[in-house]
Amino acid sequence: MQKTKIIVVAGPTASGKTALAVQIAKAVNGEIISADSMQVYQGMGIATAAPTQQEMQGVRHHLVQCLNRDVPFSAADFCRLARSAVKDIASRGKVPVIAGGTGLFIDSLVDNVQFIETKSDDALRARLMAKDTDELYDELLKADPKAAAGIHKNNKKRVARALEIYYLTGKTKSEADRDAVKETSPYDTLYFVIEYQNRQILYDRINRRVDQMLANGLVEEARRCLKTAGKTAAQAIGHKELQPYFNGSAGLEEAAENIKRETRRYAKRQITWFKRRENAVRLVADAENADLVGDAVRISRDFLNGES
């Protein structure tokens, strides 16, 4: 069976993924599928930096602001919707371009991971989350030391989820992950990763973006969205950090600095994730110039023409 050619544009937040993906899509008659765990939600466009109509430049985008905020959205959900979108785009003779920074989503799609869904129990999760951080982590150390070794004890959400899996299935998270198997991928993938050799340049871009988000109405968006967000949407960086400002325990300037700090931390995790990706074409974006776009377009055309 002939594989479907797809192009991935990945990288950390604020690295210029959307702009590059749009230029590639325009050059190769493509449509873009957003691989972002938060851009999928409606009404959160400022915090998630969802592309505006102007930024889309006439290129059709999929999985952008299409879900209600109370709907959970997992890697398995993304793969189901993205596979359908890839099939639709390719059936119309266009090129699917996957753009985003949620590495788990992207790699699960291109590697054709088949998920076995693990049920959740809100009451159990609430009881676990109510426990002291150290107590909760010690509980995971006893139940699943391998999972505990890969999770920081202060990340209560992930610690609680690992314990939830253990109590609901009788399996450790490591065993449950093994049930998610990779099958032969139906895709022939060109995988771009945007990188910054000087990380401070990326961090400066992040800080400027947050300032622009605040100028564009982030506070009002967060105030509205936090009232109706579900478990997944409520984790959006840029919203949850404003909660202390809303309840009077922090000033706006402090909340803004927290958004910048958490975004930089998230970017660092993204960089670590994408460094592990083998056979990726790495595009260094420290100096903004047309060469990066031109090189990416040329490589994309060669790939689609079978020359790479």
Image: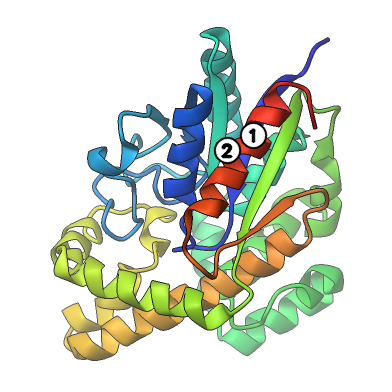
Q: Residue at x 32, y 75 (%)?
A: 208
Q: Is residue 112 left or right of residue 219?
A: right
The image position of residue 43, as x and y in percent, is 24, 47
Q: Determine the CA span between mark 1 and mark 2.
A: 5 Å
- Label 1 environment density (alpha carbons within 10 Å; few <14, some 14–19, many ≥20): many
Q: Is residue 35 left or right of residue 1?
A: left
Quarter of the picture containing the N terminus is top right
The image position of residue 181, as x and y in percent, is 84, 38
Residue 300, numbered circle: 1
Where disc 2 sits, the SS reads helix
Where disc 1 sits, the SS reads helix
The image position of residue 34, as x and y in percent, is 47, 40
Name the residue beneath numbered marker 2.
Answer: 297
Looking at the image, which is closer to me, 205 or 64?
A: 205
Looking at the image, which is closer to me, 112 or 100?
A: 100
Q: Is residue 128 left or right of residue 254?
A: right
Q: Is residue 170 above or below residue 198?
A: above
